[in-house]
Image (tube, rainbow, N blue to C red):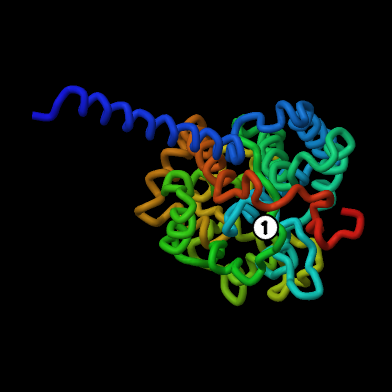
Amino acid sequence: MVSSKVLFLFALSTLALQVSAFADNNEKNEENPGLVMNFYKDSCPQAEDIIKEQVKLLYKRHKNTAFSWLRNLFHDCAVESCDASLLLDSTKKELSEKETDRSFGLRNFRYLDTIKEAVERECPRVVSCADILVLSARDGIVALGGPQIPLKTGRRDGRKSRAQILEQYLPDHNESISVVLDRFSSMGINTPGLVALLGAHSVGRTHCVKLVHRLYPEVSPEINPDHVEHMLHKCPDAIPDPKAVQYVRNDRGTPMILDNNYYRNILDNKGLLIVDHLLATDPRTKPYVKKMAKSADYWSKEFSRAITILSENNPLTGTKGEIRKHCSVANKHHSSA
């Protein structure tokens, strides 16, 4: 039999290894805590209040900013990493994400610069553009009447924009539900989460450039006839000028409120995009559409969960990335950085 002394020594050595591993993990966590609630509580205690106040002021002056912030969150975080790469300008060597055709309609980046400048005045080079992008979306959701969603911070900014890989990550509004489900699943967002996130189509507008193929040369038969006249009135040209401001409101009933009215619309065949129609008819998604049309609370819960997952998609934390001085330019490219 093994002596009690040997067993005791073995137990001591095992405990020592566990303590050492715990200490190593703690040290790593201190170096890179990842995303946490209220990350700036010591380094910039006023950061989130400043962002919230700026969002309120900008929304009061320019109502459509809230739509932009919500859309920016998806277009940044869904493309490989939630790192504000969307905000970077093109360089001589590389086209930026925001200047590609897939980013058509994205706008109001200058207002994120306004928020960044306000934060910089309080805490220079402390708060990342990636966190500002996420928190402005969070506060924009509230401005639109949507749920309050507690979101973690601690993201750092990427140094490169990845225009060449957009097609790998962003689903197109003309693609099949299978493709859309796969893209969202790769971020950890399940089917009810996908359906809930598309509820963002409850607010804002869709440019005629993205709609005319459903109206010309013939109107798609699945569109509610009561809605066709309005769509044709707003989009009178088969080949609209992409620079002209021609659009249809996503939700004519509550166009400025982020709510579950979207689901009632698409069940009534009043969805503007093909993905809206497919969402309401595909057997994998239709049950959730019907449930969210009936229950605002259920939609709000799933929307909040999906936004949280989206905002935490593969962020740069710890010593990765940087804290940009200007959101549109990586520090190494800026003379005053």
* 160 up-or-down from 66: above or below: below
Crowding near the residue tagged with mark 1, few <14, some 14–19, many ≥20 C-alpha atoms within 10 Å: some
**Nearer to me, 46 or 29:** 29
User: Where residue 301 sits in the image (x, y, percent)?
Assistant: 49, 33
Q: Quadrant of residue 59?
A: top right
> Which residue occupies 83% across, 51% down?
326
In the current view of this chain or complex, which residue is farthest to the left?
1
What type is the residue that disc 1 sits on? Thr
**Residue 151 x/y as whole percent:** 61, 35
Relative to 220, is 329 above or below? above
Quick check: 337 left or right of 10? right
Tell me the residue at 55%/58% (across/down).
Answer: 225
Where residue 95 sits: x, y (%)? 74, 71
Question: In the figure, 236 relative to 153: above or below?
Answer: below
Q: Residue at x 66, y 29 (%)?
A: 38
Is residue 5 or residue 319 the one in the foreground? 5
The one nearer the camera, 334 or 11, is: 11
- Quarter containing the N terminus: top left
Q: Secondary structure at mark 1?
A: strand
**Above/below status of 2 relative to 184:** above
* Residue 44 falls left or right of residue 231: right
Residue 291 place in picture, x, y as percent? 42, 38
Q: Mark yes or no: residue 249 visible.
A: no
Q: Say whether residue 296 is left or right of residue 18.
A: right
Is 4 left or right of 194, judged from the image as shown? left
Residue 336 seen anywhere in this rendered image of the structure: yes
Viewer-side residue, 39 vs 87: 39
The residue sitting at 68% across, 47% down in the picture is: 156
Determine which quarter of the picture holds residue 203: top right
Q: Which residue is mark 1?
A: 206
Q: Count the marks: how many?
A: 1
